[in-house]
């Protein structure tokens, strides 16, 4: 249940912040949600990654679909040297997922420090 709540919160907060602040404001949002909701580090990374992968991928597809993928076709030819607009959308989603997943991972590690060499702490 924490996973789903974390996923939804990261997506909603990131969407709200990106309407006002720059695109990288998704990183502090994922970090703060991971600090506030205790999860394992791998689960926190997955929730941050999936939240923004779905959000950015869906939003990029929505925007591209509105104009019949005209810009995505042109940019994919320019960058990828191939006419594959859906690969460009997938790369966009992957970048968004990584930008949110890594701070979510760091936030979950910040929550509880572990000292493996000193069991008395």
Image (cartoon, rainbow, N blue to C red):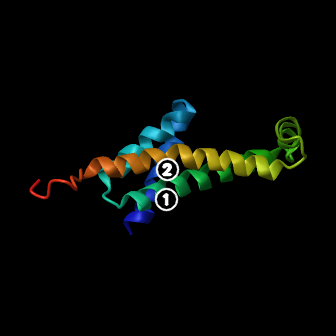
Identity of the residue drawn at 15% across and 54% down: 118
Evaluate if marks 1 and 2 touch, with contact meaning CB atoms under 8 Å apart.
yes
Q: Nearer the viewer, residue 40 or 34?
A: 40
The residue that mark 1 highlights is 46
The residue that mark 2 highlights is 101
| Rendered location of residue 36, percent (x, y) | 30, 51
The quadrant where residue 31 appears: top left
Q: Secondary structure at mark 2?
A: helix
Q: Is residue 76 visible?
A: yes
Labelled disc at residue 70: none
| Rendered location of residue 83, percent (x, y) | 90, 46
Identity of the residue drawn at 86% across and 49% down: 84
Tell me if residue 22 comes above or below residue 8 in the rendering: above
If the image is split into quadrants, where does the N terminus sit? Answer: bottom left
Identity of the residue drawn at 33% across and 50% down: 109
| Rendered location of residue 111, percent (x, y) | 27, 50
Q: Is residue 72 left or right of residue 46?
A: right
Q: Residue furthest bottom?
A: 1
Q: Is residue 62 visible?
A: no
Q: Residue furthest left?
A: 120
What's the distance in space between the residues labelled 1 and 2, CA to CA?
6 Å
């Amino acid at each position: 249940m924490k996973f789903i709540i974390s996923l939804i919160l990261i997506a909603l907060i990131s969407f709200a912040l990106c309407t006002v602040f720059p695109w990288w404001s998704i990183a502090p949002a994922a970090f703060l949600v991971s600090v506030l909701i205790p999860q394992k580090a791998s689960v926190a990374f997955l929730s941050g990654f999936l939240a923004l992968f779905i959000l950015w991928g869906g939003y990029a597809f929505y925007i591209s679909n509105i104009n019949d993928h005209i810009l995505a076709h042109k940019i994919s030819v320019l960058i990828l040297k191939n006419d594959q607009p859906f690969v460009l959308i997938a790369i966009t989603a992957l970048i968004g997922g990584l930008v949110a997943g890594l701070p979510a991972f760091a936030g979950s590690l910040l929550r509880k420090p572990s000292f493996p060499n000193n069991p008395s702490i």
